[in-house]
Amino acid sequence: MFESAAAAQVREWTATIAGGLDAVTDEERLAMIRGLEELKCAAAAAQAVLATEFDQSQRRKQREQGVPAAQLGRGVASELAFARRESPHRAQQQLGLGKILVTEMPHTMAAFRAGTITEWAATVLVRETACLDLVDRRIVDERLASDAGRLERMGVRELEAAAQKLAYQLDPGSFVARRARADSDRRVTLRPAPDTMALLSALTPAAQGVAMYAALTGEADRLRATGDPRSRGQIMADTLVERVTGQASAPAVPVTIDVVISDAALLAASEAPAWLDGYGPVPAEVARRLVTHPDARVEVRRLYARPETGELVAMESGSRCFRGPLATMIELRDQICRTPWCGAPIRHTDHALGTDDGGPTSYLNGQGLCEACNYAKQAPGWLARPGPDGDIVTRTPTGLVHTTAPPGVPPPAAPGSRAELYLSDLVLVV
């Protein structure tokens, strides 16, 4: 890939910093830390400017290629994500921030480029003025960000409150309407946490959130008063599980979950980690507890046929769409979106080589993608090809090439092993 003189110079700066910095006294170390913090802010601002220019350039090219107006910009965030080595969702957020700062908030952008404020502080100013029109947004920008010294001394919470106050004074109607529309953003999300835990988050209207928390704390206080040995937090967590699922006790999970585990690990002959669909890798012992719980109904499905590698069996379909067992196998194989650094849940099972180009509906030509990444590769100039070993090679419109391989599955027991003999006694549901 072509690298300009400016890009080469930036890489030299990176190499210089990575090689170590000379600082003898603590005063020098603190001064260096401050300087590096300002450099980080200035670098993030420079990325925002470059991303905005890249978006404008790509939109011009797509317009010249006859792309419909509603689809202009498709795939831009994905290319930026490749360059930044992060998810397309995060790159899209950064691109939106940069476009607003460059075109609508010059004082905030100047402070950002000078290293006076952090990227998060700039994000807060953009977020809290989103309900305003361009004229009012620029008034907030001038009043809060034109004095760089005052801006630098403001904490993020102080800056957020000041921006909200100004936004309300300038356009109270839009400010109130925005708060009312926020109700439509309510949602529940799940993220992995360390030590096989999970973070279940709910974004709800304030009154509902306060009411739910009060109900959980009230139940915890009641049970603690009766001598329940669990901590207050443990009782609240267990009560939440019981009331949401309708089960009598928190440990019993009465819903369908997919666990990919080797036969050896299932029968305690191996400690190879398993894969819990929708969460990620879990220790073999945790997976065994899930499938051996007295209230669990277990169905075992054997997904691989090559004892030496554990590679999942390839399947073909005459359909143009991935359905049934074939789609399930691809999703269990890929686990998360195949796009590098994305990490989002799989929403679409997609043809790497499109059916219009002769691509088969097959195991090797299939890939699990999130919705955004699947739509991005439909933009002009994107090209994907499957490899013979399960790799997918993707080439972007600007020539970046990325190869991804499926993460693999736990290997099966060796032929003739004790675990294999035990497995023959299980009922295998296909």
Image (cartoon, rainbow, N blue to C red):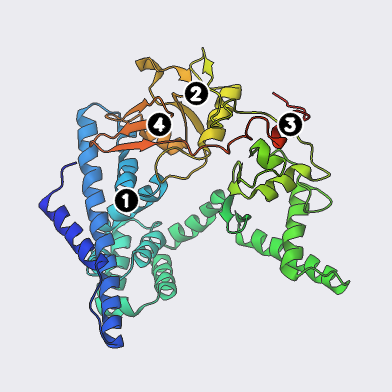
Q: Residue at x 47, y 39 (%)?
A: 337
State left or right for residue 99 relative to residue 390.
left
Q: Which residue is mark 4?
A: 391
Residue found at the far top of this picture: 318
| Residue at figure coordinates x 23%, y 38% from the top left | 58
Q: Is residue 15 left or right of residue 159?
A: left
SS type, badge 4: loop
| Few, some or many residues within 10 Å of mark 2 (<14, 14–19, 20+) | many
* Mark 4 or 1, nearer chain start: 1
Mark 2 and mark 1: Cα distance apart in space: 30 Å
Which label number is shown at residue 84?
1
> Amino acid type of disc 4?
Asp
Disc 3 marks a residue whose amino acid type is Leu
Task: Kindly identify which residue carries mark 3.
Answer: 421
Choose top left, top right, bottom left or bottom right for residue 396.
Answer: top left
Q: Which residue type does callout 1 highlight?
A: Arg
Q: CA distance from mark 3 to mark 4?
A: 33 Å
Q: Amino acid at mark 2?
A: Tyr
Mark 2 vs mark 1: which is more N-terminal?
Answer: 1
